[in-house]
Image: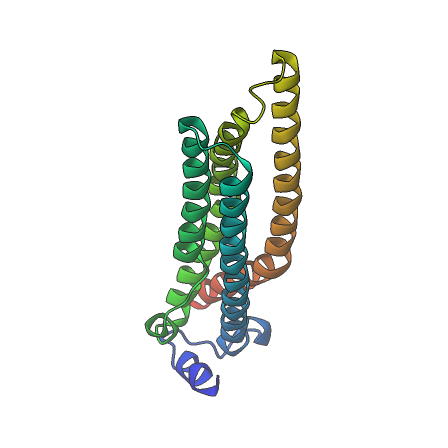
Amino acid sequence: MEQYIELWQQATIDESGMDRIYKPEDLVPMIIDLEKKQERVLRFKTLASVILLLATLIVFLNRMPLTAVSLLGIGIFISSVLAVVILLNRLRFRITYEERSSSTLKLADISESRIQSERKIFTTYLPLFLAVALVGVNLMYMDVFREEETQTRIFYHVILTASLATGFVAALRVRIRRFHKQFLPVLERIRKFKIASESLEP
């Protein structure tokens, strides 16, 4: 950590007149700590996704009829989960060693952009994942409910969809609260640092 602080102290902008709260030796540890937290969270999410997929496959192969529709449903569901795992890995808040050794303002710009990408995960990609996953799950259960009357089948599908959507919304609310708690303070510190830096420019 001390090596990173020394690198930031060699930044091209003169920070001698800047309030201590916005100095890079305060900002950089926040960014690095945030990155480490997100790495731990991503490992947990990846493990949970693998367990979910294995459990789904076991239940599907043992309890559900193997028809073209159900196989299409399981294929859509598995593909959607894998797509989210890949997406989370690609868009995770990550700062490379090369980026850490760049100028203070460049790191601030990079970190701000990565935080915005993180926000896009739950404002755009996760709702899309829910829509695709719901299609897959309903196709999986279509043959299970086939023997029921039409109204009963519709009722079961509505209950299934509502239950999954409710669980997703609850998880999404937790994700948004975590974003506000972990990312927004860093984002605010970055923006204040950039404003303070601009005020020092001749």
Please identify the quarter of the rendering in which residue 37 is found. bottom right
Q: Is residue 38 above or below residue 172?
A: below
Q: Is residue 103 visible?
A: yes
Which percent across, then down, holds residue 83? 41, 46
The one of 38 and 86 positioned closer to us in this rendering: 86
Q: Residue at x 58, y 76 (%)?
A: 20
The one of 140 and 171 positioned closer to us in this rendering: 140
Q: Residue at x 48, y 83 (%)?
A: 1
Q: Residue at x 47, y 34 (%)?
A: 132
Looking at this rendering, what residue extends furthest in the top direction?
Answer: 150
Looking at this rendering, what residue extends furthest in the left direction?
Answer: 98
Q: Quadrant of the C terminus?
A: bottom left
Tally of numbered tags: 0
Which percent across, then down, holds residue 190? 51, 63
Q: Is residue 90 above or below residue 121?
A: below
Q: Is residue 153 above or below residue 139?
A: above
Which percent across, then down, holds residue 146? 55, 20
**Relative to 108, is 26 on the left or the right?**
right
Q: Is residue 119 visible?
A: no
The one of 58 and 4 positioned closer to us in this rendering: 58
Q: How was this image coloured? A: rainbow
Q: Residue at x 53, y 67 (%)?
A: 40
Q: Is residue 107 above or below residue 84?
A: below
Which percent across, then down, holds residue 180? 62, 54
